[in-house]
Image: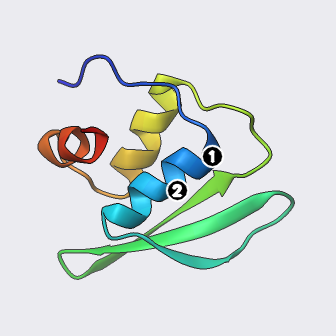
Amino acid sequence: MLKNLPSLKAKQLIRLLKSGGCKFYREGKGDHKLYVRHVEGKKRVAPIDMGEKEFSPPYVLRIFRQFGFSDTEIEDLLK
């Protein structure tokens, strides 16, 4: 189980996601941008709200989980 996840700004979260293999997919509605990651032959898409000032740790974890990151992958990205 992950502990001590930080609060992240949208640009920080996107930088981490890109370093983990996610790519920009398309613009969503409003301030959202959709990012995609291919894991085990499956396409994982998740929206990121670019209008948010800062994401809470539970929200950051939920985004990582939507993209299929394991605990060890998340810990490696946060180092």
Residue drawn where x is 37% and y is 58% of the image: 67
Is residue 63 depicted above or below 43 in this figure? above
Residue at 55% x, 76% y: name it. Answer: 24
Say if mark 2 contacts mark 1, CB within 8 Å: yes
Amino acid type at image mark 1:
Ala
Q: Position of residue 73 (x, y in %)?
A: 18, 49
For the N terminus, the quadrant is top left
State the residue at coordinates (57%, 79%): 25
Task: Read off the residue under disc 2.
Answer: 14
Left or right side of 44 for 35: right
- Quick check: 74 above or below 33? above
Disc 2 crowd rating (10 Å Cα; few below 14, some 14-19, many 20+) is some
Q: Dot 2: what SS?
A: helix
Which colouring convention does the figure follow? rainbow
Residue 32 in percent (x, y) is at 74, 59
* Residue at (82, 57) in percent of width and height: 31
Q: CA distance from mark 2 to mark 1?
A: 6 Å
Name the residue tied to disc 1.
Answer: 10
Q: Quadrant location of residue 2? A: top left
In the drawing, does residue 7 fall left or right of residue 2? right
- Mark 1 element type: helix
